[in-house]
Image: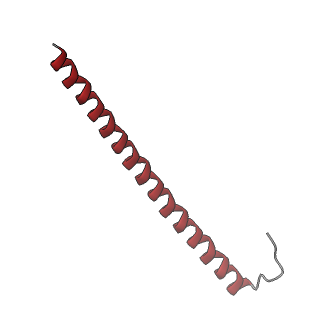
Amino acid sequence: MSNQYEKLVEQQARLKQKIEREDFKLRQSKYYENRQARKARSRRLIQKGALLEKYFQADNLSV
């Protein structure tokens, strides 16, 4: 009886660790996706600003 209980406790511990690893992977993946989206947005904003300066001579405009 106690042997069976010990096996169940060990199995529970392994499953908790597996859940924690998968949760970490998911959070890491979301962070990476958000980071890529921020980089893309920054790049677009910089390009639009450069085009604005180039075509409209917006040197005297401020944010």
Q: Residue at x 30, y 31 (%)?
A: 13
Going by the image, does 46 lie left or right of 5? right
Q: Residue at x 59, y 69 (%)?
A: 42
The quarter of the picture where residue 58 lies is bottom right
Query: Is 38 rendered above or below residue 46?
Result: above
Q: Nearer the viewer, residue 8 or 29?
A: 8
The quarter of the picture where residue 12 lies is top left
* Quarter of the image where the N terminus is located: top left
Direction right: furthest residue: 60
Q: Residue at x 30, y 39 (%)?
A: 18
Q: Residue at x 48, y 63 (%)?
A: 36
Going by the image, does 62 lie left or right of 36? right
Q: Nearer the viewer, residue 51 or 7?
A: 7
* Quarter of the image where the C terminus is located: bottom right
Q: Position of residue 28 (x, y in %)?
A: 43, 52
Q: Nearer the viewer, residue 30 or 42?
A: 30
Q: Position of residue 61 (x, y in %)?
A: 81, 76
Query: Is 35 rendered above or below residue 8?
Result: below
